[in-house]
Amino acid sequence: MARQDYNEAVNRYNAYIRRFPQVLTAKAIGKGPRPYFELQTPGAAQAPKVDFSK
């Protein structure tokens, strides 16, 4: 859920700095688009398997 909230905030920010006049001021002060959060660890998107047979 936190990843989704972060990516939504990044999307709003990136859209904001692409509008006029922010596009001019953002470039002037060195602000650029932010990257979206993506999983880097292989298998991190899958839930662990749990065995309750004991």
Image (tube, rainbow, N blue to C red):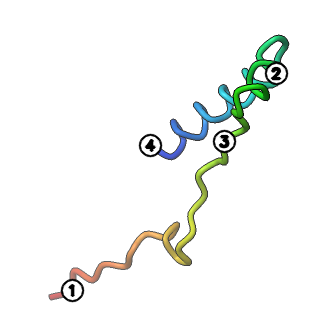
Check disc 3 and give the amino acid type: Arg
Spatial CA distance of label 3 from label 2 is 14 Å
Task: Please give the label number shown on residue 53.
Answer: 1
**Circle 4 or circle 2, nearest the eye:** 2
Q: Are marks 4 and 3 in contact (CB under 8 Å)?
A: no
Name which residue type carries label 4: Ala
Marks 2/1: CA–CA distance: 59 Å
Task: Name the one closer to the observer, 27 or 46.
Answer: 27
Mark 4 or 2, nearer chain start = 4
- CA neighbours of label 1 inside 10 A, class few (<14), some (14 to 19), many (20+): few
Distance between the alpha carbons at the discs numbered 1 and 3 = 46 Å
Circle nearer the N terminus (2, 1) = 2
Q: Provide residue 15's location: percent of width, then percent of height.
A: 75, 26
Q: Amino acid at mark 2?
A: Val
Location of residue 11 with respect to 17 vertically, above or below: below
Q: Is 48 on the left-hand or right-hand side of 27?
A: left
Q: Which residue is mark 2?
A: 23
Image point (81%, 24%), residue name? 18
- Coordinates of residue 36 in the picture (x, y in percent): 64, 48
Q: Classify residue 7 by image quadrant.
A: top right
Label 3 residue SS: loop
Q: Is residue 1 toward the left or the right of residue 35 in the image?
A: left
Q: Which residue is mark 4?
A: 2
Q: Which residue is mark 3?
A: 34
Q: Residues within 10 Å of mark 4 (few under 14, many from 20)?
A: few
Q: Position of residue 12 (x, y in %)?
A: 66, 26
Task: State the separation of the CA atoms marked 4 and 3.
Answer: 16 Å
Q: Earlier in the sequence, mark 3 or mark 2?
A: 2
Q: Residue at x 82, y 11 (%)?
A: 21
Residue that protrudes farthest toward the bottom in the picture:
54
Q: Residues within 10 Å of mark 3 (few under 14, many from 20)?
A: few
| Tag in front: 1 or 4 | 4
